[in-house]
Image: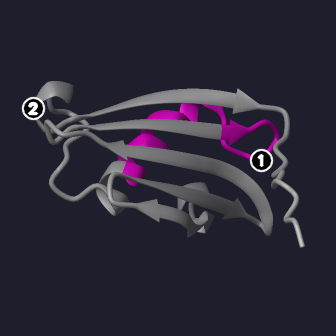
Amino acid sequence: MSLLDRIRWKRTLRTPSSERLLGMLDGRDAVAVDLHFLADGSVAGTVTVVDGCGVDRATVPALLERIDDDFLPGVDLEGDAGEGGVTFTVVWATGAESFESARRS
């Protein structure tokens, strides 16, 4: 099984115009994806890859294609971003943590 086939995706947030996905690899956070669906039909995405997760720079093009194929029907990575295409920004992170505001009683 390829590295990309081993990533297990979980949708952690969804709004009418965006969604966030978390990719787990061998039980550890590996990739976070934020997708923003724009009014012109295009998508802007930020893909955060956690250093040391097994995804290296050579794997990124295939990862972006997989995200496009699996989560963006009707949007084409090969297309023009202004005409229903997608643009990705890839960020490399040394770690990630979540913080929430405190709830008042």
Rendered view: 1 above or below 66: below
**Who comes first in sequence, dot 1 or dot 2?**
1
The alpha-carbon separation of the residues under discs 1 and 2 comes to 34 Å
Rendered view: 91 above or below 101: above
Is residue 50 or residue 12 the one in the foreground?
A: 12
Residue holding disc 1: 53
Q: Amino acid at mark 1?
A: Cys
Residue holding disc 2: 83
Rendered view: 96 above or below 74: above
Is 57 positioned to the left or the right of 74 in the image?
right
Residue 13 bears which disc, if any?
none
Q: Quadrant of residue 58?
A: top right
Q: Tell me if residue 90 is in the magenta stretch.
A: no
Is 99 positioned to the left or the right of 1 in the image?
right
Q: Quadrant of the C terminus?
A: bottom right
Q: In the rendering, at what x and y percent does residue 69 appear?
A: 30, 56
The residues colored magenta run 49-67
Q: Amino acid at mark 2?
A: Glu
Q: Residue at x 52, y 55 (%)?
A: 20
